Image (tube, coloured by chain):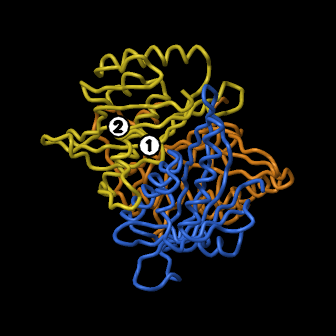
Chain colours: A orange, B blue, C yellow
Amino acid sequence: MTPDVAAVMASAGTHVPAVSADTYAQILQFYARHMQLLDAGEAEEWAKGFTEDGVFAQNVKPEPWKGRSHIATSMRRGVDRLAGRNVQRRHWFSMVVAVPDSTEAGDEEAVRTQYYAVVFETPHGGKASVYLSTTGEDVLVRRSGRWLIKHRDINHDGS
Amino acid sequence: MTPDVAAVMASAGTHVPAVSADTYAQILQFYARHMQLLDAGEAEEWAKGFTEDGVFAQNVKPEPWKGRSHIATSMRRGVDRLAGRNVQRRHWFSMVVAVPDSTEAGDEEAVRTQYYAVVFETPHGGKASVYLSTTGEDVLVRRSGRWLIKHRDINHDGS
Amino acid sequence: MTPDVAAVMASAGTHVPAVSADTYAQILQFYARHMQLLDAGEAEEWAKGFTEDGVFAQNVKPEPWKGRSHIATSMRRGVDRLAGRNVQRRHWFSMVVAVPDSTEAGDEEAVRTQYYAVVFETPHGGKASVYLSTTGEDVLVRRSGRWLIKHRDINHDGS
């Protein structure tokens, strides 16, 4: 467990600040809608779920993707590669912990999340299986009434 | 992505109307309780989660099941077939997006959902695995304080 | 379906008392944080999610673990065994139904939950898979603003 993770999760014996039920429901639905876009192959629409200066880091990539435009282009390549393989992927996010993020000051509301994600994969005419398992940590900000990803850090299990 | 899906998901850049946190929590629990009934083999109780004129369509079936009574009878056959195979199935619904449904007018509250579902399967004495992966779209209506499925459309991945 | 399960799930045709959206969001996040601790190998911190006199029963164990201290010691052994195998497990809880528990009287708030859980497993350098599937039933109590497990009953599928 990284120090950062430890700080957010806090001790089970300590009171943990929480987001409201409204915010929690919004975030679960933001994740659902956002990943439904990706699994539908809508890489550019999916990239709009990041801030203009958003960062998408993964432990299986040498460098983070920085900026919405770069994120869109990079994911478009991934989506197109997958299209040639005729498999349907489904990204599931769950086990979401969301806490107010006081380090992201300024006027906007920010939330830090920690979650699990798995990807299921079904080949055309074939059987579904688990493709991979990860943990994730996001910094989300609310702008004009909707949530955007300012920073995402994905750690693939087994790497 | 079908036009219908696109309309509900809307662009990631557009404000999306949302149900309340109360309604969202109710729907998650309705799905949980409803599928717990099915996995317990209670086909008739499960069918009561549909309206009297409810419709259950699946892309792997030539015709939708229409009406609670027909849905109950059809699912009873599936449950009984499964009982002979000595496996335990678990239906998981997640990644649920819920939006108020203004097309279902009248006096009752209606919600349109989009979600992912997987079925896990464990044979007696054997190992759990993913049985299948689907997407789903429901029209739910609230009657006498509880949610019922008016229309369900399930699309199995890989079909 | 045991009579106990039947009582909590109630008929799909009957109004079911529900916890508030706030409580539901708290419980989902309690489960997320709690199992993130376990999967990080923090057995002692994880055990603090039980009451001092908490009980952890599983159908695959001859006897329930009784008391936070015994639960911590027993889980520590499991975590250490797993560490030698170089696999990462991820416990997912979902399909959670939560109802107020009126049988747990006294001054404290109590909730009874029913849920599904799966464990995903990824070996170092290997591929993720489903390790097992279970159902669970908890009695949770709220003390000093946070939820604790007073009684947990886990039933592994296929046993």
Q: Decide which of B151, B98 is in the foreground and name it.
A: B151
Residue A8 seen from this side: no
Real-space CA distance between mark 1 and mark 2, rounded to the nearest whole angstrom: 9 Å
Q: Is residue B21 left or right of residue B82?
A: left
Position of the C terminus of chain A, as image quadrant, is: top right
The kind of residue tagged 1 is Tyr
- Name the residue beneath numbered marker 1: C115
- Name the residue beneath numbered marker 2: C138
Residue at 66% x, 33% y: name it: C129
The kind of residue tagged 2 is Asp
Instruction: Say which element carries label 2.
Output: strand
User: Which chain letter goes with mark 1?
Assistant: C
Q: Decide which of A94, A9 is in the foreground and name it.
A: A94
Q: Vertically, is A52 above or below B2? A: above
User: Which chain letter goes with mark 2?
Assistant: C
Labels in figure, total:
2
Can you tell which mark lies on residue C20? none
Q: Decide which of A102, A76 is in the foreground and name it.
A: A76
The image shows residue A43 at horizontal and vertical percentages of 71, 61
The image shows residue B85 at horizontal and vertical percentages of 66, 37
Residue at 44% x, 58% y: name it: B30
Question: Farthest left residue?
Answer: C107
Instruction: Say which element carries label 1.
Output: strand
Q: In the rendered structure, are the residues bearing label 1 and label 2 in contact, judged by CB atoms less than 8 Å apart?
A: yes
Q: Return the disc, 1 or 2, that comes first in the chain's sequence.
A: 1
